[in-house]
Image (cartoon, rainbow, N blue to C red):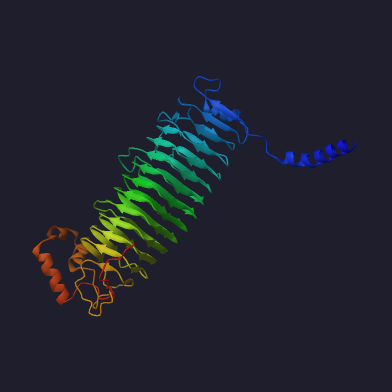
Amino acid sequence: MKLKNKQLVLTLVLLPVLASLPALAGIIHVNPAGPVKKIQQAIDHAKPNDTILVEKGVYKEGNIEVNKPLYLKGINYPIIDGEKKYEIITIKSNNVILEGFSVQHSGSSSYNDIAAIRIANVRNVTIRNNKLDDTFFGIYSHHAGSCLITGNRVRSYAKTELGSANGIHCWKSDSMQITNNEISGHRDGIYFEFVTASSIRSNYSHDNLRYGLHFMFSNNDLYEKNTFERNGAGVAVMFSKSVTMLHNRFLSNWGASSYGILLKEISDSRIENNQFTRNTTGIYLEGTTRIMISKNIFSGNGYALRIQASCSENNVQQNNFTGNTFDVATNGSLVLNSFNKNYWDKYEGYDLNRDGIGDVPFRPVSMYSMVVERNPTAMMLFRSFLVNLFDKTEKVLPGLTPEGLKDDQPLMKSLKF
């Protein structure tokens, strides 16, 4: 009798617990030679939270729609081919993981945003360790949130800006994480428009036609530890605020209108511990306010900084400027920005009290750079005796260089970061 009572008690206790557990997820195998030959067929028969394992092969299924929470895993990178006609994968469910696929040859259009992988109006989607090749838009999210896009290689072969699209494109999304991807050959490597509270980390964006990274109307975002190399321009941040840019490398973004970073109408942001090397212009600022630029290395650029007269309350401090053709250029005489405690390799002052700070201010704008700002054709005189004569004369009898653009505390030695 006692034994039966114990069994009854255990049953009453365990039944609610067992009932609360989710049903065990199933596994469906997709194989070109198996009973389930198509990925869409597996998705249609799967239950929420099932796993779909896709064996190696070539799958040409038009558009594949994922409309329930699933884990889709490619084994040895099966190929999903869009035959240059279709948007290949469209995710319309929360909690989807897509991993380990080769996705190639998406369609393209001049009036539709056709993507290889689209995340549409959902949250908590993970796109990881996939290889995208010859795509129009690579990975495209709109009205998405809390998604992770990581470890993907996104490659295309754009020839013109009009005939190409972006590698990773996020529109009206929030809390996105874009990490450890390699993007090349698109119009923009990564594109954010109306994206908030998101991060872009440790990506390599190179050889894209326009920008390695492009921000528009996107606030409270972070990008750090990325490399932007040989793009039309490294990064453009426009009409945004509270953007933090840390520990990035901007390399060899070289061309007639090329920049490491282009800042336009941006405010209340930080640019710290970055490296700008061999860019036409390290940072170009237009209409910017309250930007802190500190602890960066500017080396071997055409211009390290070009600050337009429309900028105000920006603070440039504790940076290293070495080997740049021009350290700072501007197009006006009114200066509303501050420069403090930077190292300038062109500084020729002295330090009598040996406190590490030069005893006379440094004026980083040369007369010749002011002339070039107004008349770009004057560059033909670069490295001529006449230019040196102009600059020496300007130091004795200043007439063009802005009075307020100076570093009152130039450092005698470069900073170690």
| 21 left or right of 398 in image | right
Q: Position of residue 400 (x, y in %)?
A: 20, 72
Visible residue check, residue 276: yes
In the rendered image, the quadrant that contains the N terminus is top right
* Residue 318 vertical placement versus 47 (above, below): below
Q: Residue at x 13, y 73 (%)?
A: 393
Task: Identify which residue, 107 or 225, lies in the foreground.
Answer: 225
| 97 left or right of 373 in image | right
| 229 left or right of 129 in image | left
In terms of image quadrants, where is residue 318? bottom left
* Residue 181 vertical placement versus 385 (above, below): above
Q: Position of residue 223 (x, y in %)?
A: 42, 54
In the rendered image, the quadrant that contains the C terminus is bottom left
Task: Identify which residue, 170 or 125, lies in the foreground.
Answer: 125
In terms of image quadrants, where is residue 86? top left
Q: Position of residue 384 (x, y in %)?
A: 10, 61
Task: Identify which residue, 281 or 407, lies in the foreground.
Answer: 407
Q: Residue furthest right?
A: 1
In terms of image quadrants, where is residue 350? bottom left
Q: Residue furthest left?
A: 385
| 290 left or right of 351 in image | right
Q: Residue at x 24, y 64 (%)?
A: 327
Q: Position of residue 200 (x, y in %)?
A: 43, 51
Q: How many marks?
A: 0
Q: Residue furthest front?
A: 2
Visible residue check, residue 307: no
